[in-house]
Image: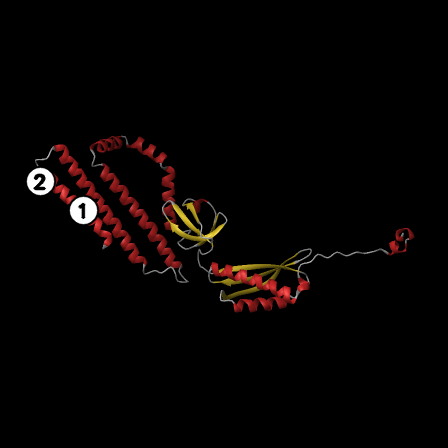
Amino acid sequence: MKRFILPVLLFLMSIVMKTIAVEWTFIPDDLHRTIEVIGSILMIAAITWALIATIRLGKNRLLTRYDISVADNLHMRKLHTQYNILEKVIVFIIIVIALGITLMQFDAVRSIGISIFASAGIAGLILGLAAQKALGTILAGLQIAITQPIRLDDVVIVENEWGWIEEINLTYVVVRIWDKRRLVVPSTYFLERPFQNWTRTSADILGTVFIYTDYTIPLEALRTELTRLLESSPHWDKQVNVLQVTDARENTLEVRALMSAATSPQAWDLRVYVREKLVEFIQREYPECLPKTRVSFHRKDQEMNDPNHQK
């Protein structure tokens, strides 16, 4: 109820001002008109405030049923995104209408409005060109709410930065980067430029670790160690456990360890853990299998028997 205390007070004040303007006939006409305009403005502000508070209260009550802190929160994040953007659109429309009605309370503005409506074609063209970029950004926000290429708490890579979608507004999106920085991106970015969304359909994700070793590495021992590491880690979801040789170069083998995790932060921690422990395992058990460069020296028999060469 605290949300409605100030709107109710403003509404009561507007009624008092309207009553004074009607009942007090002895006041001058200029003051009478001023009191009437102030009363109208207070009433418009009170109604606008009450409508916005009602919309936000209803949205908050509705979203409390859908907790996005659970592990499988795809449906919840979808609803949170839609309702938050829909709330911003409705509030924006209410404020614009309220400002328009407020300005029409002044005679000078009303006369300007009538002249604008008389030449609506030219005025609409001028305003359309001037506000083209702003309207495009607002429409992009609406399109994001409908098509949902991103949702609240999605894990994305934008401008080579990895983070979570923290806010989705009509004109911009806030990305919370892993090191707690905030990247503010216009809404049109997500409709016009490519980006990575790691949680578009689900939160689970695959992680990869590349190890470079000598050709003499025993691969079965490495696979056994990878399985042991994954089973000992709480971040592994027990879905994917693969170790493969993905490339054979001049001096090294490229070994890829593939694993899975329930969320992208867990996948990151799992990759770091497996990489460190595999390197330690090779250093401890097979130090001769670390990457090395071989150089062979061959002396021909003719050179060995040549007296001049021996000198």
Marked residue nearer the N-terminal end (2 or 1): 1
* Quadrant in which the N terminus is drawn: bottom left
Residue 196 in the image, given as x and y percentages of width and height: 48, 51
Provide the secondary structure element on which disc 1 rests: helix
Q: Which quarter of the picture shows residue 278?
A: bottom right
**What residue is rendered at 34% in x and 32% in y?**
126
Q: Which mark is residue 23?
A: 2
All told, the count of numbered labels is 2
Q: Which mark is residue 11?
A: 1
User: Mark 2 packing: few (<14 Cα in 10 Å), some, or many (20+)?
Assistant: few
Q: Is residue 138 left or right of residue 236?
A: left
**What residue is rendered at 40% in x and 59% in y?**
74
The amino acid on which the numbered mark 2 sits, given as a three-letter code, is Glu
Q: Are marks 2 and 1 in contact (CB under 8 Å)?
A: no
**What residue is rendered at 33% in x and 34% in y?**
127
User: How far is the residue under mark 2 from the one under mark 1?
Assistant: 18 Å
User: Mark 1 packing: few (<14 Cα in 10 Å), some, or many (20+)?
Assistant: many
Q: Which quarter of the picture shows residue 254?
A: bottom right
**What residue is rendered at 53% in x and 69% in y?**
232
Compare residues 189 and 106 and report the one nearer the observer.
106
Provide the secondary structure element on which disc 2 rests: helix
Compare residues 135 and 212 and report the one nearer the observer.
212
Residue 161 in the image, given as x and y percentages of width and height: 49, 50
Residue 139 in the image, given as x and y percentages of width and height: 36, 44
Q: Which mark is residue 222?
A: none
Q: Is residue 194 left or right of residue 126?
A: right
